[in-house]
Image: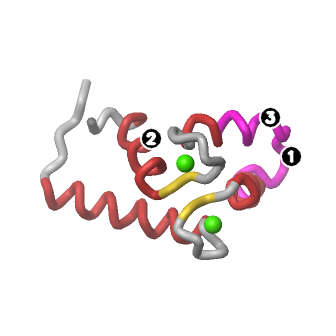
Amino acid sequence: MAKKLTPQQEKDFVSALKDCFESVDTDHSGSLSIDELTEVMKKFSSSTPLPKGGIEKIMKKFDTNHDNEVSFDEFKSVVFKNLNLQ
Ligand SMILES: [Ca+2]
Ligand SMILES: [Ca+2]
């Protein structure tokens, strides 16, 4: 079931996503490298080390144009898709 956001809700959501994206993008390049994603995953799963293949799987899911970096647009569209917002 697709949810429908009001333009204001969508704006707030995108700006929250942007904050999240920027906190992961530690070198402020405007895109997320596999190293940056690895760092963030380590933070979220401090007790269990993630297998390298796990990160690569996540990376592939986000990196739709296969340049080995996740841009904000890629990040946003995957999150929206997963939440059935589009
Ligand atoms: Ca970066
Ligand atoms: Ca990409």
Q: How many marks?
A: 3
- Residues marked 3 and 2 touching at CB (< 8 Å): no
Start and end of the magenta stretch? 43-58
Q: Is residue 72 left or right of residue 15?
A: right
Check disc 2 and give the amino acid type: Val
Q: Is residue 56 left or right of residue 49?
A: left
Q: Earlier in the sequence, mark 2 or mark 1?
A: 1
Instruction: Indicate whether residue 45 is drawn in magenta.
Output: yes
Vertical placement of 24 versus 50: above or below? below
Vertical placement of 75 versus 60: above or below? below
- Residues marked 2 and 1 touching at CB (< 8 Å): no
- Residues marked 3 and 1 touching at CB (< 8 Å): no
The residue tagged 2 is 78
| Residue 11 position in % (x across, y down) | 23, 62
Label 1 CB-ligand 1 distance < 8 A: no
**Coloring basis for residues:** secondary structure
Check disc 1 and give the amino acid type: Pro
Marks 3 and 2 sit apart, C-alpha to C-alpha, by 19 Å
| Residue 56 position in % (x across, y down) | 73, 39
Instruction: Indicate whether residue 84 is drawn in magenta.
Output: no
